[in-house]
C-alpha cells in the first residue's frame, strides 16, 4: 500500500537550522538586559556565572568520560556552560564589542557541533529510507511470485477438472455404443479401461 507523502512546511525545515543562532542571540540579549539592570562590573554576579559555567563544564566532562558516557547529557552540559559564560561576559562587560565577539564565536561553535549531528541524522534517515524501499521491493517481488504461483495452481486445477469431466463423459458414452467390446481392446494390446458402474433407474 502506498503511503501518502506529506510535504513539510518551510518553517518546520528552517527552524532547526536557525536554532543555534536563536539560542546564542537570546543569551546575548538577556545578558545585555542583565547588564543594563546593574550587572555591569558586578564582581559577585561575574563570580556566580564563573562558578555556574565551570560547574556545567565539569559535569559535561564527567558525563562524557568513561565507557557509559552519555553524549546527550555531555553536549547539554557543555552548551549550558558556554551559554552561562556568554551571559556572564555580556552582563559584566561595559562595551558591546566583547559580547558580540563571544556571540559570534559561540554561534560558530554551535553550528559546527550541530552540523555534525545533522549529518549523522541525515545519514541515518537515508539508511532507513533505503532499507524501507528494499523491504518494499522484496515484499512486492514475493507478492508477485505468490500471485503467479496461485494463478498457475488454479489453472492447473481447472485443466485437471476439465480433463476428468471429459474422461468421465467419454467413459459413459463408450458404454452406450453398439457392439463395443472391451475384451477386444485388451486383445489388441490396449490397456483395459476400468469399468464404470452406472446407476440403474427403478
Image: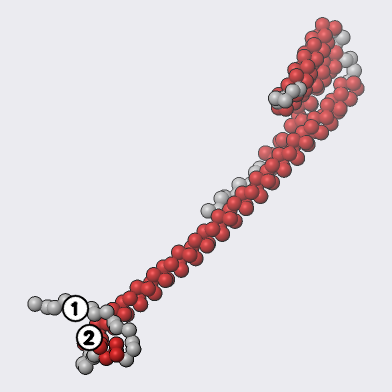
Residue 15 placement (x, y as % from top left):
71, 36
Question: At x 48% / y 63%, what residue is drawn?
Answer: 147
| Residue 83 in sight here | no
Does the CB distance between marks 1 and 2 fall below 8 Å?
A: yes
Residue situated in front as seen by the camera: 139 or 32: 139
Residue 43 occupies quadrant: top right
Q: Secondary structure at mark 1?
A: loop
Circle 1 packing at 10 Å, graded few (<14), some (14-19), many (20+), is few
Q: Which disc, if any, is residue 175?
A: 2
Q: How many marks?
A: 2
Write down the residue under mark 1: 198
Task: Say few, some or many: other residues with alpha carbon within 10 Å of mark 2 (under 14 / 14 to 19 / 20 or more).
Answer: some
Decide which of 181, 97 is in the foreground and name it. Answer: 181
Say which residue appears at 35% left-offset and 77% top-offset.
163
What colouring method underlies this structural image? secondary structure
> What kind of element bears circle 2?
helix
Amino acid at each position: 500500500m502506498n503511503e501518502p507523502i506529506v510535504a513539510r512546511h518551510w518553517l518546520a525545515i528552517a527552524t532547526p537550522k536557525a536554532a543555534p543562532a536563536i539560542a546564542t542571540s537570546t543569551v546575548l540579549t538577556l545578558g545585555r538586559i542583565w547588564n543594563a539592570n546593574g550587572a555591569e562590573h558586578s564582581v559577585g554576579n561575574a563570580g556566580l556565572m564563573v562558578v555556574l559555567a565551570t560547574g556545567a563544564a565539569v559535569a559535561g566532562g564527567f558525563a562524557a568520560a568513561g565507557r557509559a558516557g552519555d553524549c546527550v547529557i555531555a553536549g547539554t552540559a557543555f552548551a549550558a556552560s558556554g551559554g552561562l559564560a556568554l551571559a556572564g561576559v555580556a552582563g559584566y562587560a561595559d562595551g558591546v564589542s566583547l559580547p558580540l565577539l563571544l556571540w559570534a564565536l559561540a554561534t560558530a561553535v554551535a553550528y559546527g557541533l550541530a552540523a555534525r549531528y545533522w549529518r549523522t541524522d541525515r545519514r541515518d534517515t537515508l539508511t532507513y529510507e533505503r532499507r524501507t524501499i528494499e523491504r518494499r521491493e522484496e515484499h512486492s517481488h514475493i507478492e508477485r511470485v505468490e500471485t503467479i504461483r496461485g494463478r498457475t495452481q488454479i489453472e492447473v486445477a481447472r485443466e485437471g477438472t476439465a480433463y476428468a469431466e471429459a474422461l468421465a463423459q467419454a467413459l459413459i458414452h463408450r458404454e452406450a455404443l453398439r457392439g463395443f467390446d472391451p475384451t477386444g481392446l485388451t486383445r489388441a494390446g490396449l490397456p483395459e479401461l476400468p469399468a464404470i458402474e452406472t446407476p440403474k433407474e427403478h
